[in-house]
Image (spheres, grey):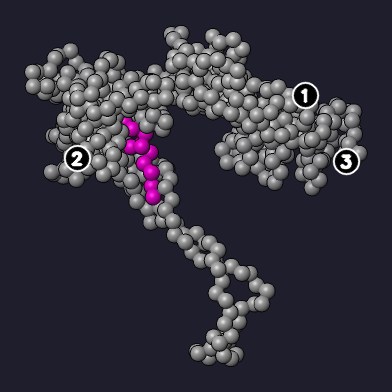
Amino acid sequence: MRKAIPALVVLACLPLSRHAAGDDSIPPDVLKALKKATVYVKVKVEGEDCTGSGFVVREDDGTACVITNHHVIAPELVEIVAQWQSAPRTPFNPHNFPGPFGPHGLPNTPPLPFGPSQDLEPRLRLVVREGKNVEVTVIFDSGTPDERAVKADILGADPNIDLAILKVAGLKNAPHPVDCKQAVDCTETMPVYSFGFPFGDVLSTGKGNPAVTVGKATISSLRNDDAGELALVQIDGALNPGNSGGPVVDARGRLVGVAVATIRNSSGIGLAIPARKVPSMWEGHLGKPRLEVVPAVDVDSAPMMIATADVFDPFHKLKAVSLSFLAADGLGSKPKTGDRLKDLPGCHEMALNINGHIATGRAPLKKGVQDVRVLYQGETVDSEGQRSVTHSVEQLLRVPPPAFSRPMQRSVAAVNPYWAPKYKVTDPLTTAADFAAVVDDLKADDFSRRVQAEMRLIEATPQGRHLDLAAALAQVLSSDTNAVVRSQAAWALEKWGSAENLPALEKAAQTDASSAVRSRAKITIDAIKGRK
């Protein structure tokens, strides 16, 4: 059984030049434009229906872009699942076992004297997960005779700031978009107005969809993040479930924020995402970078630092992405918001390669390094040369020990006394017999044979296309029970793999139990996709 969690929605405003009247009400022409720009968002996911709000921010020749919340187009589903758990076994009581037959004439079976001390019994628990196979429909002029429904595509969504951008094509008489770039100096007690569709279809008075609701509230708090930047606008009143994704504007129709949530069991306290975060959804931005470490192969090798970041660039405006990092220990004062780490002494820069919605990069750490504290920052450059940096983040990188406690014998002339190879390691790996031997060794039961074969492939130069060999490595990556072997297989695929091996690599990058394998697979994916 599953149940959709209702979304919260609020509509953004359309900033126009006309000033508000003396009673702080929105001028009629501005009000009309805002209502037309506000849209009703309907989401169908796995048989469940959810609703929210949104507003038009761009329009070009019948194609409109709509802003809403991420949680509106990616609702969470609640499932009740049964899990078998251990429970104490009821002790055997001889008084309850009077004879060989039970009360119904069936044989009684006493507990086994040496059986398990635990029984299994079902336990019910709630599981919350994100829905799949989402279908989004946007309703323009909802609740009016001009109402029309259009299917929408999801251009991008950032769960970290809870915003998403939708594309609606083939739209006639598109509403004038809301201007999201006019800055508004927000202050406590300032009156604001929300546009949206609270409670969804509940407020519909006919067979069609509900009409837009306009609510009035006041700003009660401006909440900053750790970097001192405005993170949330807290308002008193006007927000209800269904308002999520709609605009919140001032009395002149200028965008203040995007409604995102209400505080449960509060007296009308709501939250809005600041308006300054909206333009980044189509101008392109970098999510918070993530760092992890791939352990060294042996004591003579260096561990590898892997950087991964989500890229939100629906209109392909970003031309370059990089990561600046330096050791945080010994650093005097911490950088301020907006400061660039690359301007500090001792800073290193790592170029990140963009592949779809992910940017990845790697850099070696010093040999034998122990856990190290790193300060890092992402930076983007758009098509016009404009640079933007993320907040600097400090993270303790825990460096796993090397996979082998002694140096690996990498020389092709070296022979491991515990392993009798099926091919001459001194010969170039070019003949069909050599490749057949390596494939056999990749399937060997002996752990050392599999690893040595992979090391041989990592050092050898590929000669032409060897699909059988790449397929064997992909099979090892998918099925081997040893994480070291799987990691080495992903490493070898960086040389020998092709686009045909990407499914196995992408699966390993997402689901492998070992973080080292996941990181190594991401590097190989980046290398294969980056080839010309």
In-front residue for pair 128/313: 128
C-alpha distance separating marks 3 and 2: 73 Å
Identify the mark nearer the N-term, 3 or 2: 2
Q: Secondary structure at mark 2?
A: loop
Name the mark nearer the viewer: 3 or 1. Answer: 3
Q: Secondary structure at mark 1?
A: loop
Residue holding disc 2: 209
In-front residue for pair 317/532: 317
Q: Residues within 10 Å of mark 1 (few under 14, many from 20)?
A: few
Q: Exactly how many numbered labels are in the figure?
A: 3
Residue holding disc 3: 419
Q: Is residue 290 left or right of residue 462?
A: left
Residue holding disc 1: 461
In-front residue for pair 68/145: 68
Q: Is residue 337 above or below residue 117?
A: above
C-alpha distance separating marks 3 and 1: 23 Å
Q: Amino acid at mark 3?
A: Trp
Residue depicted at x 28% and y 43%? 264
Q: Is residue 403 left or right of residue 261?
A: right
Residue 466 lies in quadrant: top right
Identify the mark nearer the N-term, 3 or 1: 3
Q: Secondary structure at mark 3?
A: loop
Q: Is residue 431 visible?
A: no
Q: Is residue 197 left or right of residue 442?
A: left
Q: Is residue 185 visible?
A: yes
Magenta segment = 64-78
